[in-house]
Amino acid sequence: MASNRRPGTAEQPRTGTSSGRPTSRDVARRASVSQATVSLVLGGKWEGRVSPRTAETVRDAAQALGYRPNLSARSLRLGRTRTALLVVPALTHDYFARVHAGASRIAAEHDFGVVLYPSPEGIGPAVDPFGSARAALDGVIASSMAPDALAALREGGLPLVMLDTDPEGDRAVATVNLDIADGMRQVAGHLLGLGHRRLAHLAAAVDTWTFGVRAHSLAQAVALEPGAELRTEPSDLSVEDALRGATRALTADPRPTAVICDDDLLAAGACKAARRLGLRVPEDVSVTGFDDLSLATALEPELTTVRLPAEAVGAAGMRALLDVLAGREANAPVLPVQLVRRGSTAEPPSES
C-alpha cells in the first residue's frame, strides 16, 4: 500500500486521545518519565520527590504539547479544587445576589471560586448540577433551602454549610443564621406601639424554616398584646399573588389596619391591593416588608421593612466552609437584623 508521507519526513508518534488532545501519558513519553511523575509535577507536589531538573523537563513537555490537565480527574487525585457551590432559591432576587457577593469576596481572598446554582423556591429536590463531576467541588453553601432540597448533593459526602436554616438540623456541618425571630418581633412591636390592634399577616406559602420562624414569632408577639388580633393570608412569593392575598385580607370585616408581609415583594403586592381598593398607605392601612430589597425605596411611600445583612451572611457562610475544609471548628454566628422605619407605617386611622 502506498504511503501518504512526503519523501524525507519521519512519521511522528500519535499523541492524545481520539479528540486530538494530548494526555498525561503523552507528556510522560515526551519527558521520558512516568505518569506518576507528571502528576506530581503538574499537581505541584514534586518538591522533595522529583529533582528540579526533571520538574522543569515535565513542564516544558506539557507546554510544548499544549497539555491541559483534566480538572475533574485532577480533583479526584488531589482532593481539592478550591471551588464551592452556592445554592440559592432564585438568581433574580436582590437578597441572594448580595449573599453571592459576600461569599465571593471571602472566597477570592482565599483563592477559591464560587459556582452559583439556583433551586427554584428552595423546595427541591435540587438537581445535582454536576452529576458524576461532584468531585470538582470542595463543598456546598446553601441559602434559605427546604430540609430535603439538597439530598442529591449531600449523598456525595461534600461538607454542607446552611444559611438561614433550622440550626437543629443534622444535615449541615455548620449553620449561619439571621435573627429572623427578632426581626419579626421588631415589626410587631413597631406596629403595636403605633396603636394597631387588627393585623394581617401576608405569609409566604413556602415550607422553609425561615418563613416558619417569621409566622411563629409574629403570632407570639401579637398574642402577648391584649386586644390584638392577627389574620393570616398565605401567598406565593410574587406581586401578583400578594395582590390577591392582600385584597382578601383588606376586604375582611373588620378590616385590618396593618398588613405585615414576609417579603418586600409581598409588601409591593399589598400596597397595590390597597390602592386598587381606594385605601391610602399609611393613612388607611400600614404595610411592612422584610429583607430591605432595592424595591423597598422604589415604592411610594417608601417601605418600612427589616434589613437583612445579606453580604455578611454570604461571607460568614464562606468562612465557615473554609474552616471546615481546614479542619477547624466552624464559626457559625447568628447575625442581627434591623427594622428600618419609612413612610409606609403610621398610627391607625382614628375611626379604627
Image: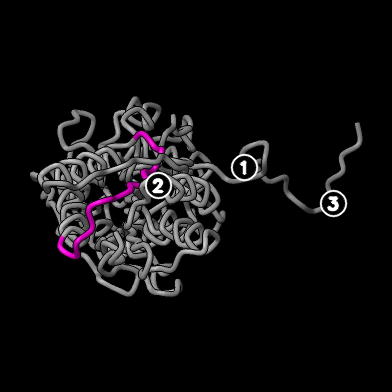
Give x and y (percent) for residue 171.
Answer: 23, 30
Which residue is at a point 73% across and 48% down the rendered structure image? Answer: 10
What residue sits 48% from the left and 43% below the top? 70
Figure colour scheme: one colour
Check disc 1 and report its element: helix, strand or loop: loop
Tell which tag, 3 or 1, sits nearer the viewer: 1
Q: Secondary structure at mark 3?
A: loop
Mark 2 to mark 3 CA distance (whole Å): 63 Å
Classify 10 Å Cα crowding around label 2: few (below 14), some (14-19), many (20 and above). Answer: many
| Spot occupied by residue 315 in the image (x, y as percentages of width and height) | 24, 59
Is 83 within the magenta? Answer: no
Question: Total label count?
Answer: 3
- Which residue is denoted by mark 2 in the rendering? 88
Going by the image, does 332 lie left or right of 162? left
Q: Earlier in the sequence, mark 3 or mark 1?
A: 3
Point out the stretch of residues depicted in magenta.
Answer: 193-207
Identify the residue at image location x=28%, y=66%: 350
> Is the Cβ of the residue at disc 2 closer than 8 Å to that at disc 1?
no
Of residues 132 and 173, the one nearer the viewer is 173
Q: Amino acid at mark 3?
A: Pro
Residue type for callout 2: Val
Residue 80, horizontal then vertical, whole percent: 30, 44
Classify 10 Å Cα crowding around label 3: few (below 14), some (14-19), many (20 and above). few
- Please name whichever residue, 50 or 288, is drawn nearer the observer in this view of the structure: 288
Q: Which residue is denoted by mark 1 in the rendering?
A: 15
